[in-house]
Image (cartoon, rainbow, N blue to C red):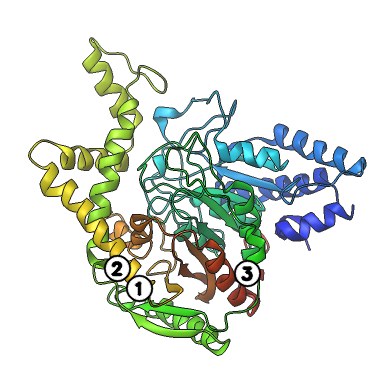
């Protein structure tokens, strides 16, 4: 089996046994990228020279007989909104096309401490605003299962890189589903941790009360390993949870006996592709047969989550993106005076979706509309969270589809509202700050279907255990996108 198709845990074992070298592994991934990148376009920036040096350093440790960390020598990609010292971080936006941060995000330092090999910066929707990676300021990324379809978004480059064998693992960010939905579309495992479980320091802000970094991997075991590497308290992030993170690999247990699963009835209504609903129901029946208890629950304010999110997130974006004015850093246009310079810099630098959300957010925060829109949206957010609290009084986890459909064709959803509806099952989890994991649970016409498992705050271990038990009873995670091997 090609090295680029293997998992972190398999490759770690092979490295420690000296069956392979880290340099050999990095070369395998880069050779694969040479073959498929022109079709997929996962990367904005590749860091091959740096990656080969990182791999050689791991081989030197192994040669000395030193123990290595679980991610040591394992090639992975970073979404291009995660700051990397000395390496361009563009947020897939023309306004930051040449921005090179002078510091690392905390997660990057944590990965460096494990000697992980970084292959490059992955494409995404501009400033993480979108669900298809069609909103990148540079180019569209394609789905490895069908290159005429989107990989999802906004972490589409991260998910497609893992699915196509251009990275063994990747980091994404999730503001309203941006890890879980592309993982679902690309047949990968995507985990959004509890808000505050992973430091946001060095993540370029979109909506600060919703953003969270997390892993996209080949299987659930790898997800636990990457989460182990990046989770934990960080004094540089004021919203970081000051509580030690457990060892998530302890949750890799094939047992769901007595696990109480809730099925929210609001998540199986109008708009869901019938084959997607059938795949989820089949997966739930399988978990039931394995000893889990299943019951229907209600999250009555679900229908209001989407409009609330599309007021809160743009309002925060409007505030966060005010800093891109052509003065401190980023793209600068010339103007006859400072106002013209601001206008031209922002008009040239931002794409249509980012402009749409800035205008929406600015309007929602403006005098006379604040109470009517933004404040009301915050009150709805509280109601959404209370729905989850009530449901978790009865069950341990909730299971839903990750997205209402399989991956759609590039250009198919030109209406922004139709695109926003793709986030209907992922957004409420961000509003409530809960952990959620998406994993493949079937295929429809050759395209992967994602199942979402949602947990209580800080119950990542519970959702990892449920996901692992289901995954190990099936072979969906072993299937590889046939791209380039026809």
Residue at 48 percent across and 55 percent down: it is 179
User: In the depicted view, which residue is nearer to us: 35 or 217?
Assistant: 217
Image coordinates of residue 83 in percent, x first then y, are 53, 33
Q: Residues within 10 Å of mark 3 (few under 14, many from 20)?
A: some
User: In the depicted view, which residue is nearer to us: 442 or 434?
Assistant: 434
Of label 3 and label 2, which has the lower sequence position? Answer: 2
In the displayed structure image, the side of residue 139 where residue 68 appears, left or right: right
In the displayed structure image, the side of residue 469 where residue 298 appears, left or right: left
Image coordinates of residue 125 in percent, x first then y, are 42, 45
> In this picture, is 336 found above or below 273?
above
> In this picture, is 438 found above or below 353?
below
Q: Do the residues labelled 2 and 1 touch (CB within 8 Å)?
A: yes
Residue at 48 percent across and 33 percent down: it is 90
Question: Is any part of residue 443 visible from this angle?
Answer: yes
Q: Do the residues labelled 3 and 2 touch (CB within 8 Å)?
A: no
Q: Is mark 1 on a helix, strand or loop?
A: helix
Q: What element carries label 3?
A: helix
User: In the depicted view, which residue is nearer to us: 442 or 148?
Assistant: 442
Image coordinates of residue 266 in percent, x first then y, are 29, 75
Name the residue tied to disc 1. 391
User: Furthest residue to the front?
Assistant: 243
Image quarter of the N terminus: bottom right
Residue at 65 percent across and 73 percent down: it is 253
Which circle, 3 or 2, is nearer the viewer?
2
Image coordinates of residue 286 in percent, x first then y, are 54, 85
Q: Distance between the residues labelled 3 and 1?
A: 29 Å
Name the residue tied to disc 2. 387
Q: Are marks 3 and 1 in contact (CB under 8 Å)?
A: no
Name the residue tied to disc 3. 477
């Amino acid at each position: 089996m090609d090295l680029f198709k293997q998992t972190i845990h398999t490759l770690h074992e092979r490295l420690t046994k000296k069956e392979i070298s880290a340099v050999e592994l990095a070369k395998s991934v880069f050779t694969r990228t040479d073959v498929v990148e022109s079709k997929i376009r996962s990367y904005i920036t590749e860091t091959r020279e740096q990656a080969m040096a990182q791999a050689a350093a791991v081989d030197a440790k192994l040669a000395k007989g030193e123990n290595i960390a679980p991610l040591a020598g394992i090639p992975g990609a970073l979404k291009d909104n995660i700051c990397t010292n000395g390496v361009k971080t563009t947020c897939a936006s023309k306004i930051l096309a040449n921005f090179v941060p002078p510091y690392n995000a905390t997660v990057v330092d944590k990965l460096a401490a494990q000697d992980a090999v970084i292959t490059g910066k992955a494409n995404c929707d501009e400033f993480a605003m979108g669900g298809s990676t069609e909103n990148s300021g540079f180019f569209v990324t394609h789905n490895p299962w069908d290159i005429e379809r989107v990989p999802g978004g906004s972490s589409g480059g991260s998910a497609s890189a893992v699915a196509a064998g251009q990275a063994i693992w990747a980091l994404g960010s999730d503001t309203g589903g941006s890890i879980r939905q592309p993982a679902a579309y690309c047949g990968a495992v995507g985990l959004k941790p509890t808000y505050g479980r992973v430091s946001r320091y060095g993540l370029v802000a979109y909506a600060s009360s919703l953003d969270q970094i997390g892993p996209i991997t080949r299987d659930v075991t790898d997800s636990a390993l990457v989460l182990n590497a990046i989770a934990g308290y960080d004094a540089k992030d004021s919203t970081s949870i000051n509580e030690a993170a457990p060892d998530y690999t302890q949750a890799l247990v094939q047992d769901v006996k007595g696990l109480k699963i809730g099925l929210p009835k609001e998540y199986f209504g109008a708009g869901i592709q019938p084959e997607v609903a059938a795949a989820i129901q089949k997966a739930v029946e399988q978990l039931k047969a394995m000893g889990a208890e299943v019951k229907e629950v209600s999250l009555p304010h679900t229908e209001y989550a989407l409009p609330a999110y599309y007021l809160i997130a743009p309002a925060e974006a409007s505030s966060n993106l005010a800093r891109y004015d052509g003065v401190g850093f980023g793209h600068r246009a010339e103007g006859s005076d400072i106002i013209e310079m601001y206008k031209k810099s922002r008009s040239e630098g931002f794409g249509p979706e980012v402009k749409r959300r800035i205008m929406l957010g600015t309007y929602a925060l403006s005098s006379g509309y604040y109470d009517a829109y933004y404040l009301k949206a915050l009150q709805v957010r509280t109601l959404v969270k209370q729905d989850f609290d009530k449901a978790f009084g009865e069950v341990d986890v909730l299971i839903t589809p990750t997205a209402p459909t399989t991956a759609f064709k590039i250009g198919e959803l030109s209406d922004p509202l139709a695109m926003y509806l793709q986030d209907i099952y992922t957004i409420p989890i961000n509003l409530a700050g809960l952990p959620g994991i998406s994993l493949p649970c079937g295929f429809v016409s050759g395209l992967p279907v994602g199942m979402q498992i949602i947990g209580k705050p800080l119950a990542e271990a519970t959702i990892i255990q449920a996901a692992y038990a289901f995954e190990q009873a099936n072979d969906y995670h072993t299937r590889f996108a046939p791209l380039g091997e026809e």
